Amino acid sequence: MSKTAGQGRVEAVHRALVLLKLMGEEGSLGVTEAAAALDVNPSTAQRLLATLVGDGFAVQGSGKRYEPGPEFLGPRALRTVPPLRERLRPYLERLFERVCETVHVATLVGTEIHHLDGIEATTHALRFGLRTGVTLPAHATSAGKAMLADLSTGDLDALYRIVLSGNRARESRIDLNGLRDELERTRRRGFATNFEESESGVAAFAVAIGVIDGERAAFSIAMPIARCSRSDIATFATHLITTANEAREALGLANRTER
């Protein structure tokens, strides 16, 4: 085993994980084998194994060999994490019930958003249709601006540097200074807006949820701009913030206060 530790690695944790991996592969592990695998003294290996036993990740079986314990083999350890779409679906449904307008979950992919899931409001004669599976420029959408507002200025500039320096810079029509100003307004309000920036006739509002399993996600509400009133904006903002906070709490993310 290489003694070269990765940057920031906690060696004791790394050794314990190596022992768990070996127990999983071999079925059981003796102190001598553990010491050889880690290139440590047997006393050190025994202390590590005893710690795993104390926390339920190992048990001492016959012949003083160590085997995987209940915490290592239990349902929680074997449980797979559901896809992001499934994890956020209950809160998307909750948002839909609150606003009775078309709602989406979107993720940030580079400088575009991907509409991961949605529920269409079908009871309105004049309504906004589903955009599930559709990608749009982040800077022109409410969901995109909500997620971009969570980035630092440096991260935002790095994200758009390639776009603005490439052959498609002119056709992208991105005003980075204007975008920075818009994102600052989004941070102050606590929600993002889109009035016919991505599509003619649309009004949309969004709140970022945060980073879940490495993906930035946001909830959004969209409706025909002809039906949008000032009271709708305030109501939608409240429901977006409330629903996003509920999702964050359930997913163990840091919650936010209204700004």
Image (tube, grey):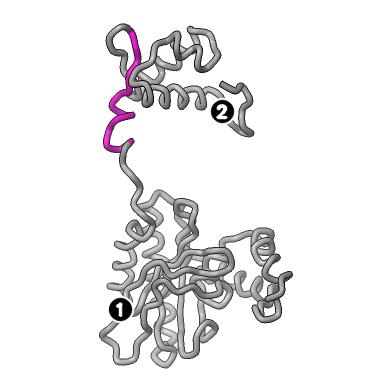
- Disc 2: which residue: 10
Q: Is residue 240 above or below residue 53?
A: below
Neighbor class of circle 2 (other Cα within 10 Å; few <14, some 14-19, many 20+) is few
Residue 217 percent coordinates (x, y) = 46, 62
What's drawn in magenta, residue-wise?
64-77
Q: Secondary structure at mark 2?
A: loop
Identify the residue under disc 1: 100
Which SS class for mark 1?
Answer: loop
Q: Position of residue 253 (x, y in %)?
A: 44, 51
Q: Is residue 252 left or right of residue 215?
A: left
* Residue plotted at (39% across, 21% down): 52
| Quarter occupied by the N terminus | top right
Would residue 112 appear left or right of 161 to someone viewing this image? Answer: left
Disc number at residue 141?
Answer: none
Amino acid at dot 2? Val
Q: State which mark lies toward you, 2 or 1.
A: 2
User: Gap between marks 2 and 1, in whole Å?
Assistant: 50 Å
Q: Amino acid at mark 1?
A: Cys
Between 216 and 137, the residue placed more toward the observer is 137
Inspect the magenta stretch and tell me whether residue 71 lies in it: yes
The number of discs equals 2
Q: Answer left or right for 8 relative to 230.
A: right
Magenta stretch holds residue 110:
no
Residue at position x 41%, y 16% from top? 49
Q: Earlier in the sequence, mark 2 or mark 1?
A: 2
